[in-house]
């Protein structure tokens, strides 16, 4: 295993300072006027600020062991990119919860409790393993968001730039935490084990957040069941968002897995202009 950066040299990773006007869109069901699709993405946004802060901290703990200058520079850029994502998603989440009456603390406290337990009970490398697992999730979802326009089709146009910018930068820095884990001596077995736990917790947090949002929107238990049925169909039908990720997800369990085995630099090229224009 190499202790050098494995990110291709033509991947830029320059952090972009963005700001979005989401006020109008967040008031309603911004994704296709559909309560589930909207709650799904809102629920995911709710995980970012605390999750990404954890990614930054976990990578920082092992930064001193990195000797490759290119990887060190990438760790710095990764940190700034994630800090910007945290800032923008925090604004998104706070405004969303104000406008729609969701309980931000209720959703965030569960995640904070997870992180606190992790920090208190387990060695720092476990934080890095969980970071690498979550970065795989975000990388494969980001790939699909950029690749398949149907996933956000019908969304309020005001929200598209934010999701695309985030997906773009997740693609750029998808191997950074992985490379740091290699430097830190991460093993394949522990990586697989952590991914199973992370998948379970991620699913539980998403279910909790979506359900909280739908309940706060005033849907009764039976109405929520119906909404969930439609939502699960959207996620897992043939070509459904999550179902389409299955093979990319499972690649993580291969002993020789590396994020850039999914070489999707063509997406970075095709969205480059749009992202540059946004940052201007
Ligand atoms: Fe991010
Ligand atoms: Fe990331």
Image (tube, rainbow, N blue to C red):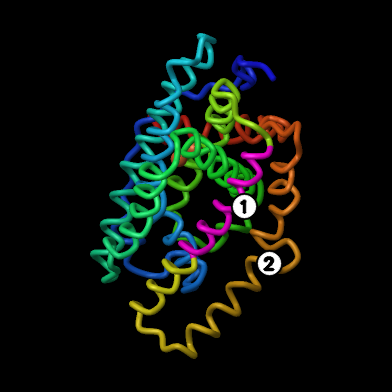
Q: Is residue 253 above or below residue 199?
A: above
Instruction: Give the residue at x 23% y 64%.
Output: 98
Asked whether 216 or 207 is in front, the reply is: 207
| Residue topped by disc 2 | 236
Q: Is residue 64 above or below residue 21?
A: above
| Residue topped by disc 1 | 196
Determine the image quadrant of residue 185: top right
In this rendering, the count of numbered labels is 2
Q: Which region of the structure is painted magenta?
A: 189-206
In percent of width and height, residue 33 lies at 47, 72
In percent of width and height, residue 101 lies at 26, 71
Quarter occupied by the N terminus: top right
Q: Is residue 95 above or below residue 81?
A: below
Q: Label 1: few (<14), some or many (≥20) within 10 Å?
A: few
**Secondary structure of the residue carrying numbered label 1:** helix
Q: Earlier in the sequence, mark 2 or mark 1?
A: 1
In percent of width and height, residue 268 lies at 60, 32
**Position of 274 compared to 82: left or right?**
right
Asked whether 58 or 81 is in front, the reply is: 58
Asked whether 169 or 261 is in front, the reply is: 261
Determine the image quadrant of residue 266: top right
């Amino acid at each position: 295993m190499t202790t050098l950066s494995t990110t291709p040299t033509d991947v830029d990773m320059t952090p972009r300072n963005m700001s979005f006007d989401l006020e109008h869109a967040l008031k309603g069901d911004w994704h296709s006027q559909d309560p589930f699709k909207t709650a799904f993405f809102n629920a995911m946004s709710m995980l970012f600020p605390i999750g990404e802060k954890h990614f930054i901290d976990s990578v920082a703990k092992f930064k001193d062991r990195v000797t490759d200058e290119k990887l060190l520079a990438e760790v710095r850029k990764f940190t700034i990119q994630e800090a910007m994502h945290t800032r923008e998603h925090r604004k998104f989440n706070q405004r969303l919860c104000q406008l729609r009456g969701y309980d931000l603390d209720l959703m965030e406290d569960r995640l904070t409790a997870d992180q606190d337990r992790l920090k208190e009970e387990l060695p720092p490398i476990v934080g890095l393993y969980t970071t690498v697992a979550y970065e795989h999730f975000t990388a494969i979802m980001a790939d699909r968001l950029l690749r398949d326009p149907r996933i956000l089709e019908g969304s309020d146009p005001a929200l598209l730039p934010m999701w695309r910018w985030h997906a773009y930068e997740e693609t750029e820095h998808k191997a950074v935490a992985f490379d740091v884990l290699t430097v830190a001596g991460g093993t394949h077995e522990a990586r697989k084990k952590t991914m199973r736990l992370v998948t379970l917790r991620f699913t539980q947090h998403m279910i909790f957040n979506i359900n909280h949002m739908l309940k706060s929107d005033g849907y009764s238990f039976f109405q929520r069941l119906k909404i969930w049925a439609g939502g699960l169909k959207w996620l897992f039908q043939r070509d459904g968002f999550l179902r389409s990720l299955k093979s990319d997800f499972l690649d993580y369990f291969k002993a020789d897995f590396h994020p850039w085995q999914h070489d999707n630099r063509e997406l970075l090229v095709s969205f480059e202009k749009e992202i540059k224009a946004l940052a201007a």
